[in-house]
Each structure stands twice: as C-alpha cells, then as structure tokens.
Image: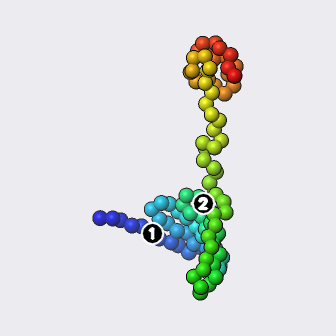
Amino acid sequence: MAIRFRKSKRIGKRGRINFSRSGIGASVGVRGFRISVSPDGKIRRTLSIPGTGIYDTKVVGSAKPEAKKAARKPKRKCQACGRAAGQKDVFCRYCGARLE
Ligand SMILES: [Zn+2]
C-alpha cells in the first residue's frame, strides 16, 4: 500500500504552505506571479499569463546555505608520509617533515 501525503494550508490571502512527504514548502503570489520555496530550499519564481497556460519558472535563489562541501578546504596531507595534516600545521605530527 502506497501512502501519499500532500496537504496545503492557506496563510493569509496570498500565501500557502505545502506539506508533502519531501518536506514543507511555501508559496506566495498573485495571478500571474508567484514565488515559492520548495522543501529542498530552492526559491522559484513563476511568471504566467492567466488563461493561456503559458508560464515560465526560474530558480532565483536558495533558502538554505550552500552545501558545506563548498566551504570545506581540501584535506592536507604530508608529502613525506602521506598521513593527514591539520590545516595550520607547519610540520607533520607523525614524521616531522615540513608541510607545504
Ligand atoms: Zn609525515
């Protein structure tokens, strides 16, 4: 049995919060223009021409900070023995070789 869960709740006149299995999203907008935040943190704006079915969606930002991996520096390694070295170490703590 597949259970599906999707629910939305109106917030004020123009806002909406969407609950789904992947998380909570939100959107706010008027006819022809909508900004929404998906559960994965992506902010999208949707422009549409009411009554035509024509619309354009674009990701304009992220509500979540960029993935941590982008900020993490590559791990340093001792050239002599190959073991891990701290970012600020000057000498290898294992073999004493000078680190680059
Ligand atoms: Zn070393």
Q: In the rendered view, tell whether residue 70 sits above or below residue 19.
A: above
Seen in the image, is 100 located left or right of residue 24? right
* Mark 1: secondary structure: strand
Which residue of the protein is positioned furthest toward the front in this rendering?
Answer: 79
Closer to the observer: label 2 or label 1?
A: 2
Q: Residue at x 62, y 34 (%)?
A: 74
Rendered location of residue 28, percent (x, y):
63, 72
Category of crowding for the residue at label 1, using alpha-carbon neighbours closer than 10 angstroms: few (below 14), some (14–19), many (at least 20): few
Rendered location of residue 51, percent (x, y):
59, 87
Rendered location of residue 21, percent (x, y):
45, 62
Residue type of the residue flagged with mark 2? Lys
Category of crowding for the residue at label 2, using alpha-carbon neighbours closer than 10 angstroms: few (below 14), some (14–19), many (at least 20): some
Q: Which mark is residue 6?
A: 1
* Numbered marks: total: 2
Does the closest atom of ligand 1 sit within 8 Å of the Cβ of label 1? no
Q: Nearer the viewer, residue 92 or 19?
A: 92
Q: Nearer the viewer, residue 36 or 99?
A: 99
Q: Nearer the viewer, residue 9 or 93?
A: 93
Q: Which mark is residue 42?
A: 2
Lower sequence index among marks 2 and 1? 1
**Marks 2/1: CA–CA distance:** 19 Å
* Mark 2: secondary structure: strand
Which residue of the protein is positioned furthest toward the top in this rendering?
Answer: 96
Q: Is residue 13 visible?
A: no
Q: Is residue 58 visible?
A: yes
* Quadrant of the snapshot with the C terminus: top right
* Quadrant of the snapshot with the N terminus: bottom left
Please tell me in which quadrant of the rendered image residue 12 appears: bottom right
Seen in the image, is 79 located left or right of residue 22? right
Residue type of the residue flagged with mark 1? Arg
